[in-house]
Image (spheres, rainbow, N blue to C red):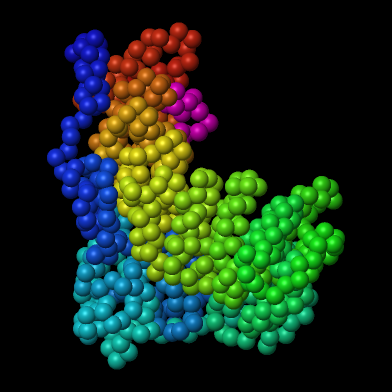
């Protein structure tokens, strides 16, 4: 085939792509269906318009354990008593059941799987039924962490029989499983079960201080400086207490809090201190404290204006009497005195000026979080006002970096065990400001830390992402998928993002692109992304530009150090074909390959280019022939020698193949 024939063929294929055939199954997406990861591609293959109903008749896939938790288990660990026995059982039988309340079982479970050399760990839902569990097959063994809860997980069968069946399934694929379940039957399963006992709390503290190279002598010195006895320091033997103590000691060493407030935090037993402070503080101090709790570490001037706005809102007679008050003049006292009364202080970066840039921080660790939970529980009348005040700060005062404040609002809902958390965030999703819409996404992040909330989160995101939702609510769904919940459920996330892209403005398309970029930074997600993006059919010029951008993400043109190639060669070539059809994308592809070839100091970049070239320019494929034609034309037009590094690498590859 000549170059002109090949170019004519490429043009015809472009025209065919621009006018795809209508899918006969488009009406099927307008009916209610059960959504599972395996059905994600098939469901969205038809029309992307029309109402979609997501039901969860089946359990969603087991999400991966967060990488940060596994890394923490590798670096910071104090083995509980009987840990070695549990390790021996897991190594011999591929499955072990951990018992023992407040013994650090979940952290020990992660460390057990790490000790087995397992790098991929999945968290099984506590509501899963054991007979339905099927371990995943793969080249690398997968570990499973299961917080098992009766009565339905074993269908009433003897524990020995259930564990034996699970063991057989795991051994067939080389997997390992750790179950954490005190409520499982005690009379059977003894050959698989180990009862852990908590280690000494001092040992737990020292294990957390070890990464900071803090010796036992230095630890004793810190305890003495704070002025606390060991009996007060360790009222319980829980490993969680040891972690908490270590965190407070590190904060004291770093100068974040003084000894008095660290001692108060280590010796308090409940929330009476918050309640006592709140009953004696006036409206002025209460408003500043609430503002600081949401905006801790923000500049003082912003905190001052936010406090003024909240005070006006809560002192409005139309709101009723939320709490007894006698509002004083906000300018009556100096800033530092006012902050002192609100249990907060100014933190400088070392410069005395400008005063306005100093940040506000509470004197006692955790005070802001506990204060917000107390206000939410004790004063229901203030809830809507606080939520609306916080969103108004973003839209009226221009707080662009609002994720921290919104996340603290979500943490307040989580600490208060607010089950209908979605209803409290929906007004933010309907706001005309995209900054406020993004706050709703950030507020969901604290809920993603608990696996028991994942189903509720997915339900909520499906609701926001539906076709009948407003563009602002769909924007909230797209930005939420940039966070942990998107990483945990990548197939479901890609299906939702595709549906969102079918009716999107420029701002929403940008949010979808950022979500895909974040998903692509994790190696395990790349095959799913490459495969799923092929089903996204462009319907107009704007959408086609967006799809080309997604193809660049899928093959690693945007973040080459984090993305390798050829997880799925066919999908990879199709993405290259999408880029080869558009002049700007072709040019970007060639420029990127040339830059990688020119990076002589980075063999990693050159390796990317070599793999890309050998895959993209395979002469036995239509895509390779098309790209080869455009590459030859680019070389012919390169009169200034800018593509010489790419020419040299291609010449070297030819010599190697010869």
Image quarter of residue 412: bottom right
Q: Is residue 598 above or below residue 272?
A: above
Q: Residue at x 26, y 60 (%)?
A: 55
Residue placed most toward the observer, 260 or 213: 260
Q: Which residues are magenta?
A: 591-605
Q: Main secondary structure of the magenta part?
A: helix
Indicate left or right for 325 with 525 as reference: right
Name the residue at 46% across, 38% down: 507
Q: Position of residue 489 (x, y in %)?
A: 35, 55
Residue 599 part of the magenta-drawn span: yes
Q: Give the camera-side residue of 20 and 104.
A: 20
Q: Is residue 131 above or below residue 482?
A: below
Examine the rendering and report whether any part of residue 113 can be seen.
Answer: no
Q: Quadrant of the N terminus?
A: top left
Q: Residue at x 40, y 21 (%)?
A: 584
Image: 527 above or below 261: above
Judged from this view, the residue extending furthest toward the front is: 318
């Amino acid at each position: 085939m000549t170059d002109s024939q090949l170019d004519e063929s490429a043009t015809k294929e472009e025209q065919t792509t621009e006018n795809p055939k209508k899918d006969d199954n488009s009406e099927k997406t307008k009916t209610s269906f059960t959504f599972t990861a395996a059905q994600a591609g098939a469901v969205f293959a038809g029309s992307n318009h029309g109402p979609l109903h997501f039901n969860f008749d089946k359990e969603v896939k087991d999400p991966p354990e967060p990488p940060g938790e596994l890394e923490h288990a590798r670096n910071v660990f104090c083995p509980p008593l009987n840990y070695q026995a549990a390790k021996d059982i897991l190594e011999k039988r591929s499955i072990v059941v951990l018992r023992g309340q407040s013994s650090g079982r979940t952290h020990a479970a992660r460390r057990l799987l790490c000790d087995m050399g397992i790098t991929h760990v999945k968290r099984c839902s506590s509501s899963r039924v054991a007979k339905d569990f099927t371990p995943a097959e793969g080249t690398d063994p997968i570990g499973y962490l299961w917080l098992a809860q009766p009565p339905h997980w074993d269908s009433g069968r003897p524990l020995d029989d259930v564990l034996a069946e699970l063991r057989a399934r795991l051994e067939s694929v080389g997997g390992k499983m750790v179950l954490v379940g005190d409520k499982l039957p005690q009379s059977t399963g003894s050959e698989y079960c180990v009862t852990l006992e908590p280690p000494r709390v001092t040992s737990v503290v020292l294990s957390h201080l070890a990464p900071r190279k803090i010796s036992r002598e230095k630890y004793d010195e810190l305890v003495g400086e704070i002025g606390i006895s060991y009996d007060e320091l360790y009222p319980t033997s829980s490993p969680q207490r040891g972690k908490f103590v270590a965190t407070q000691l590190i904060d004291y060493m770093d100068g974040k809090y003084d000894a008095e407030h660290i001692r108060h935090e280590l010796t308090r037993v409940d929330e009476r201190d918050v309640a006592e402070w709140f009953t004696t503080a006036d409206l002025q101090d209460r408003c500043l404290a609430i503002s600081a709790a949401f905006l801790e570490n923000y500049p003082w001037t912003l905190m001052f204006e936010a406090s003024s706005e909240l005070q006006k809102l809560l002192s409005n007679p139309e709101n009723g009497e939320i709490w007894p008050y006698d509002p004083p003049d906000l300018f009556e006292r100096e800033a530092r005195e006012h902050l002192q009364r609100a249990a907060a202080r100014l933190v400088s970066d070392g410069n005395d000026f400008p005063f306005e840039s100093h940040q506000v921080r509470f004197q006692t660790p955790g005070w802001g979080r506990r204060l917000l939970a107390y206000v939410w529980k004790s004063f229901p009348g203030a809830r809507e006002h606080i939520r609306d005040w916080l969103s108004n700060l973003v839209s009226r005062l221009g707080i662009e970096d609002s994720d921290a404040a919104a996340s603290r609002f979500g943490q307040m809902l989580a600490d208060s065990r607010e089950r209908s958390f979605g209803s409290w965030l929906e007004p933010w999703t309907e706001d005309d400001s995209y900054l406020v819409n993004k706050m709703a996404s950030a507020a969901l992040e604290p809920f993603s830390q608990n696996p028991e909330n994942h189903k509720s989160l997915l339900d909520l995101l499906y609701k926001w992402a539906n076709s009948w939702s407003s563009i602002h609510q769909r924007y909230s769904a797209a930005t939420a998928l940039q966070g942990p919940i998107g990483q945990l459920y990548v197939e479901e996330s890609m299906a939702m993002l595709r549906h969102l892209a079918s009716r999107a403005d420029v701002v929403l398309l940008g949010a979808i692109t950022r979500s895909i970029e974040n998903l692509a930074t994790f190696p395990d997600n790349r095959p799913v992304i490459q495969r799923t993006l092929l089903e996204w059919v462009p319907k107009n010029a704007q959408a086609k530009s967006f799809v080309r951008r997604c193809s660049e993400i899928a093959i690693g043109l945007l973040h080459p150090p984090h993305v390798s190639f050829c997880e799925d060669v066919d999908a990879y070539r199709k993405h290259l074909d999408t880029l080869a059809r558009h002049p700007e994308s072709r040019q970007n592809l060639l420029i990127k390959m040339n830059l990688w070839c020119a990076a002589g100091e980075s063999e990693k970049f050159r390796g990317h280019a070599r793999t890309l070239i050998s895959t993209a320019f395979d002469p036995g494929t239509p895509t390779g022939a098309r790209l080869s034609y455009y590459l030859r034309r680019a070389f012919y037009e390169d009169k200034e020698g800018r593509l010489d590094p790419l020419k040299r690498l291609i010449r070297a590859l030819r010599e190697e193949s010869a």
